[in-house]
Amino acid sequence: MTLRGFDALRLDVEAFAAEAATLEGRWLLAELPRLTASTSDDAPADRSIQWRAAGRAVKARVGPAQTWLDLQVQARLPLQCQRCLGSVETEVAVQRSLRFVSGENQAAALDADSEDDVLALSRAFDLRDLIEDELILALPLVPVHGSCPEPLVAPADDPAFEQPARPNPFASLAALKSAKPGGSA
């Protein structure tokens, strides 16, 4: 069998798995616009994402071989610290195996019944979109520094966060209680 060149942006996943082929490379963060929108504003344009994809066909007991794609992605992303709002460098790693089946209906049925991640086959599968999706899903919900580089200002110490004084509800209640009923002395 002769190995042919595969394009990560128009990948024939079934042929890729049948040949047990491997692709790897780097993409700039700027090439992944949805992921870029999740990073801090000062993210360098030349930041890169390293990835590797390997196809494999697994013989089934009955029927045709199962088509699998093993994905590994490494990225160091500048995210916004939710404590100090500064930029925090965050390592994001993805290691996932995805099973491909012939159609959307079969993928939905198997995905509901199985713990495997299942996608529908396509002759022009965009691996970059999949990698971007997986990185977005792997982002931490609340990125924070271990120890923020700038001292945090407590809201009580910051005049911008000064709250207007509210009357004490118990003082109002005490005033009502001490008032004479009926307004007569």
Image: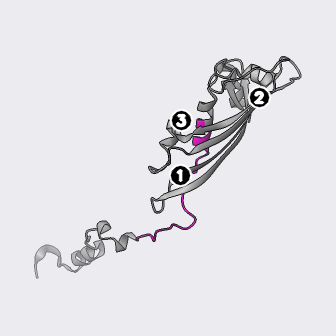
- Mark 1 and mark 2: span between their CA atoms? 32 Å
Task: Give the residue at mark 1.
Answer: 78
Residue pictured at 22% horizontal, 77% vertical: 175
Foreground of the two, 140 or 10: 10
Q: Nearer the viewer, residue 182 or 133?
A: 133
Element marked by disc 1? strand
Residue that carries the numbered disc 2 in the rendered image = 68
10 Å crowding of disc 3: few (<14), some (14-19), many (20+):
some
Return the x and y of residue 118 as percentages of the image width and height: 70, 29
Give the spatial CA distance, label 1 vs label 3.
Answer: 16 Å
Count of numbered badges drawn on the protein: 3
**Residue 45 is a magenta residue:** no
The answer to whether mark 1 and mark 2 are in CB contact below 8 A is no
Q: Quadrant of the N terminus?
A: top right
Mark 1 vs 2, N-terminal side: 2
> Which mark is nearer the camera, 1 or 2?
1
What residue does disc 3 label? 31
Please state which amino acid type lies under the numbered disc 3: Glu
| Residue at the extreme right of the image, as rendered | 61
* Left or right: 162 as drawn, with respect to 30: left
Up the image or down, 86 lies above or below 111; here it is below
Q: Is residue 166 above or below residue 106?
A: below
Q: Residue at x 64, y 29 (%)?
A: 127
Q: Earlier in the sequence, mark 2 or mark 3?
A: 3
Can you say which quadrant of the picture contains the C terminus?
Answer: bottom left
Residue 96, image x, y percentages: 72, 38
Q: Nearer the viewer, mark 2 or mark 3?
A: 3
Where does the magenta region start and end? 132-153
Q: Position of residue 164 (x, y in %)?
A: 25, 68
Q: Which residue type does callout 2 highlight?
A: Trp
